[in-house]
Image (cartoon, grey):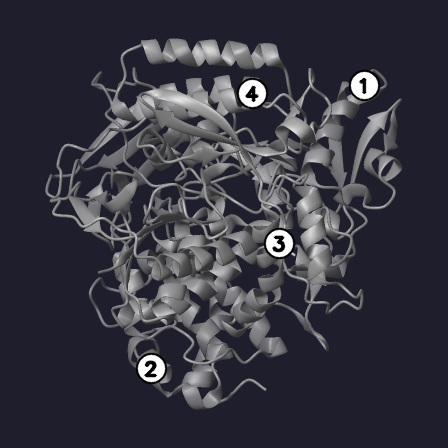
Amino acid sequence: MIFHIEILRQKNIASDPYRQRMTVEATDPKMTVATLLKALNADPELKDDSGNRVDEIKWECSCLQKKCGACAMRINGKPRLACDVKLGEFKKGEIVLEPLRKFPVIADLIVDRSVMLDNLKAITLWLEKEANHTKKGEDIAYEASRCLQCGCCLEVCPNYLSGDSFFSAAAFVPAARILSELPKKEQAQIIGNYKSHVYQGCGKSLSCRDICPAQIDIEQMLVNSNAVAVWKRYFK
Amino acid sequence: MRFNIIGAGLAGLSAALTLAQAGEKCNLISYAPSERAQSVMAEGGINAALDTMGEYDTVEEHYEDTMKGGVYLADPNAVWELCSHAPEIVRELDRLGVPFSHNEKGIVERSFGGQKKKRTAYVKSSTGKMLMTAMIDAVRKYEVQGLVTRYPRHQLIDISIKDNMLSGVTIQDRFTSEPTFLHGKTILALGGMAGLFDGMTTGSAHNTSDAQAMLFEKGVEFANLEFVQYHPTTIGISGKRLLISEAARGEGGRLFVRRNGEPWYFMEEKYPELKNLMPRDVVSAEMVNVTARGDCEGQVYLDMTGIEKKVWQTRLSDLRDQCMHYVDIDPVRYPVPVAPGIHYFMGGVYVDEHHRTNIGGLYAAGECACQYHGANRLGGNSLLGAIYGGKVAAESAMNSTELRESNESVKNDVYSGDVPPILAKKISTILYRSLPIIRSEQDMLTAKTELGSLLANPHSIAEHRRIILALAMVESALNRKESRGAHKREDFPERDDEHFRKLSIVQMQDGAIRHTLREIPERRS
């Protein structure tokens, strides 16, 4: 099948973005967008639709199996992992690849997502004391620990703006682990941070729940953490 | 002065945590944030003789299984320390909040390859990810306190050594290309060398092997490069091999091949004690043998259809998701076609039991180091080895005074370039053809010639280094004229303890690869 690929490109932080279109043939419907990008970069003869040589497309990938979050990008307008999306999905053969929009673009499809890790520091996301294990806490901790820090949730969140004090799901999902495992009397600091950086800013659109490539039960994480942090219900 | 740690996977995080808990400062340098490290992909579990399953498990048995699984090529003193510290390491992970399952005796464990008792602590089939989340959170506290300084998008591009003593490392920011020289004792936690088999392993694309290739060129000793682990149950998917965790067999999955049209559970017939859970080198070699037989089909299947529904939900859920998404097979209902795939490098940077390399002030831990696993690693020992190795390396670094003073400034001309995909593929194809599960001398000699002719072509520094590292690997395999663990030869099918129960050391000297055999230490009483 013939695929028409359009990539929003940008040489470096300072340069202007431009769109480059190329046409390639791929036969395996199970091929992922990640492998497609690898194949494009492995072809030194690759030309775009105007006949210009295609320079190396900058993008990030590590695991190629939805476990590391490196390859998050906008694929036909939706934030997704390139290793998650198979070419068989594109019935019309049209693929548009763009960098995530809520982070600074470094080059092509690479963005600087360090703000997410800074936010986790800002809400003091660590266990100050030994974890308190409960059966329910185990399930929440497992689900919360699956967060990839890929940034797809921030991309679709109507309340998240870069640089704003609301940190969105990329912070409140990991926080659910700490809130479920921290002994009650140690919770004051993170609860304060949680209220100001999560509870007060979240409009509960839950668009994050529908986009999460790890399919984390984000609503459940939010409900549990709000129960602990705001409504003072503790896990028995 | 700060310590440098190169790599922020499990071994790097463990080293950082050890240093920070002792009040020491470190730079934690990684190509990408910890969330992207290969450690997050580890599935099955972490070994420790916790004796929570009513089987009277002991540290001694963990030690024996590890030594036997590694076909007695590992340092017995290092392995003993690893196994005896394992229970405390797993309990510490529990305190850090890893959501292990618990029973009335403590942490629940399961069966794993090469071990007669249930000794593998786990969280479903995402153990690596769970450990990493807990360790990342634990290290974050020290980042805020200023003890750990992250360089989270930086690659190691050069190392400064004089008279076998380190002064520091040069790293480069991937976003700005800016180089930085960091004076200080350095712990390597680079991960494996998946890039030598580009697209043919279960590992991460970040583990290009470029850092190892640079270190090798600079005179750092490597050991046992010929021992490349083929995991028995992998599936080729888009761009890589997908791992089906050993946990699938630990929970009851069975391997079979169709013989004269009927399923033959060959592992159960040949190995009635451990059955499908023999060490990985044994299972992979048996898979090669049965598929080569005239009365068998060429495809081995992993039958997981007998696993109880509850086990799928509570212990293997994400394994099922991955199978369905990438292979379009529901393993609950149908057997899955599997084949051995490259999964782990037992060899790497030579270290002694204190994780010291041959260079003063330079240490190595995790998969990049040659330690604990001998000729074949047992499942569940890699996460353990990474955490324990990182800890020991950090302690050795703190206890040592070895470091050269430095008045070096940043050198701008050390960037060596990348290995382009076409050459990476060429090298990988040569290595893959010559280093299969059962090896032939002729194939290895051909590979040596082919790599030699690649060297004769014009190439960048990075390209040159990768070819040299590949050559060192092939030559190490050629020189080991015996079969042991993951290194099996058709021309030398027997183990030869007299000549080869030794480490094969490689080092660059005066522009040539020098090979020596080194004795393995005796076990202290």
Q: Which mark sits nearer the N-terminus, 4 or 3? A: 4
Circle 4 crowding by C-alpha within 10 Å: few under 14, some 14–19, many from 20: some
How far across and down, in percent of the image, does residue A95 sit? 36, 34
Return the mark for residue A5: none
Residue found at x 39% / y 73%: A126
Instruction: Out of B357 and B238, give the one closest to the viewer.
Output: B357
Res. A1 in view: no
Taking B223 as reference, is B87 above or below it? below
For mark 3, what is the residue?
Answer: B524
Using the image, name the chain to which the residue with label 3 belongs: B
- Amino acid residing under circle 2: Lys
What's the residue type where badge 4 is placed? Answer: Asn
Q: Secondary structure at mark 2?
A: helix
Instruction: Name the residue tied to disc 1.
Output: B293
**Residue at horizontal 43 percent and vertical 76 percent from the top:** A127
Position of residue B355 measured from the top left corner of the image (x, y, whole percent)? 45, 50
